[in-house]
Image (cartoon, rainbow, N blue to C red):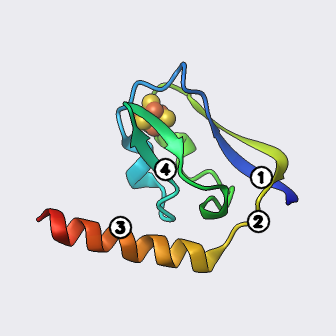
Amino acid sequence: MVLRNMVIIDEDKCDGCGLCISACAEGAIKLIDGKAKLVSETYCDGLGACLGHCPQDAITVEHCECAEFDEKAVAINGDIIKTETVRAV
Ligand code: SF4
């Protein structure tokens, strides 16, 4: 665990529009049961590229103790997402 910035999603504000998902280059956010959720702390670089895309102001960046950002895990996750997309076509 390390002290760093992390995206926090307020589920009460989230309406499930999905705009933050495409805004996240790391694939860290998924819609689960109609709400945006951080899939893994290791996928979030904490830069908050998704913040400006949320019309509900449901996303904040907070400094907290959490798992370290893991670029290798992001790359593996990206390959999984690409594979899922190919299968869905
Ligand atoms: S952009 Fe905001 S309201 Fe839309 S899914 Fe993401 S967190 Fe929820």
Q: Which residue is the site of mark 4?
A: 29
Specify whether tag 4 is near ligand 1 (CB below 8 Å): yes
Label 3 Cα neighbours within 10 Å, binned few <14 / some 14-19 / many ≥20 = few
Mark 1 vs mark 2: which is more N-terminal? Answer: 1
Secondary structure at badge 3 equals: helix
Mark 4 vs mark 3: which is more N-terminal? Answer: 4
- The three-letter amino acid code for the residue at tag 1 is Asn
Residue 65 locus on image (x, y percent): 86, 50
State left or right for residue 46 relative to residue 55: right
Give the Cα separation between the discs numbered 2 and 4: 16 Å
Secondary structure at badge 4 equals: strand
Question: Disc 1 vs disc 2: which is toward the camera?
Answer: 2
Question: Disc 1 vs disc 4: which is toward the camera?
Answer: 4
- Residue drawn 54% across and 26% down? 11
- The three-letter amino acid code for the residue at tag 2 is Glu
- The three-letter amino acid code for the residue at tag 4 is Ile
Q: Is residue 31 visible?
A: yes
Residue 23 locus on image (x, y percent): 44, 53
Give the Cα separation between the discs numbered 4 and 3: 12 Å
Q: Which residue is the site of mark 2?
A: 68
Label 2 Cα neighbours within 10 Å, binned few <14 / some 14-19 / many ≥20 = some
Give the Cα separation between the discs numbered 3 and 1: 24 Å
